[in-house]
């Protein structure tokens, strides 16, 4: 009986740790994607594809997204 409880506890701890690692890895990828998008927007401004006012709106939304991802990381992954 003790071995069963220890085994279940160990599996639970391993599952929690792997989920936490998965979430933090996915958040890093998501933040990198947002940073890539910001780079593409700068390229689009320089190539005359979008206006700076439109780009500013995009940047505000992307910055807000990064803040939300960072908040989630701070609350769920640490």
Image: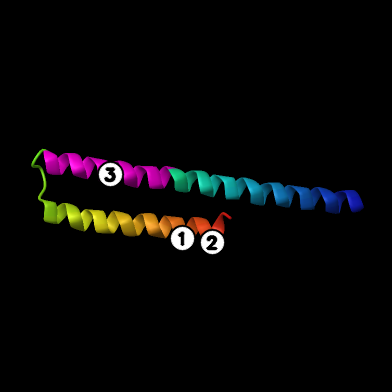
**Label 2 vs 3, first from the N-terminus:** 3
Q: Mark 2 Cα within 10 Å, few/some/many (few <14, many 20+)?
A: few
Q: Quadrant of the C terminus?
A: bottom right
Q: Mark 2 points at which residue?
A: 75
Q: Residue 6: image x %, image y %? A: 84, 51
**Label 1 vs 3, first from the N-terminus:** 3
Say what secondary structure mark 3 lies in: helix
Q: Residue 57: image x %, image y %? A: 20, 58
CA separation in Å, label 1 and label 2: 6 Å
- Residue 37 lies in what quarter of the image? top left
71 on left or right of 55: right
Q: Are marks 1 and 2 in contact (CB under 8 Å)?
A: yes
| Labelled disc at residue 17 | none
Say what secondary structure mark 1 lies in: helix
CA separation in Å, label 1 and label 3: 20 Å
CA separation in Å, label 2 and label 3: 25 Å
Residue 35 highlighted magenta (yes or no): yes
- Residue 60 lies in what quarter of the image? bottom left
Q: Main secondary structure of the magenta part?
A: helix
Say what secondary structure mark 2 lies in: helix
Q: Mark 3 points at which residue?
A: 37
Q: Mark 3 Cα within 10 Å, few/some/many (few <14, many 20+)?
A: some
Query: Residue at coordinates 65% horizontally, 48% vertically from top-left?
Result: 17
Q: Mark 1 points at which residue?
A: 71
Segment colored magenta: 29-46
Count the labels in the image: 3
47 on left or right of 4: left
Q: Are marks 2 and 3 in contact (CB under 8 Å)?
A: no
Query: Residue at coordinates 81% horizontally, 48% vertically from top-left?
Result: 7
Residue 31 highlighted magenta (yes or no): yes
Judging depth in this view, the residue of 33 and 74 nearest the camera is 74
């Amino acid at each position: 009986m003790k071995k069963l409880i220890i085994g279940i506890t160990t599996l639970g701890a391993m599952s929690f740790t792997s989920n936490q690692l998965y979430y933090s890895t996915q958040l890093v990828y998501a933040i990198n994607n947002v940073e890539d998008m910001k780079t593409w927007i700068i390229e689009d401004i320089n190539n005359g594809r979008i206006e700076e006012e439109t780009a500013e709106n995009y940047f505000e939304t992307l910055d807000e997204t990064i803040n939300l991802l960072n908040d989630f990381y701070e609350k769920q992954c640490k």
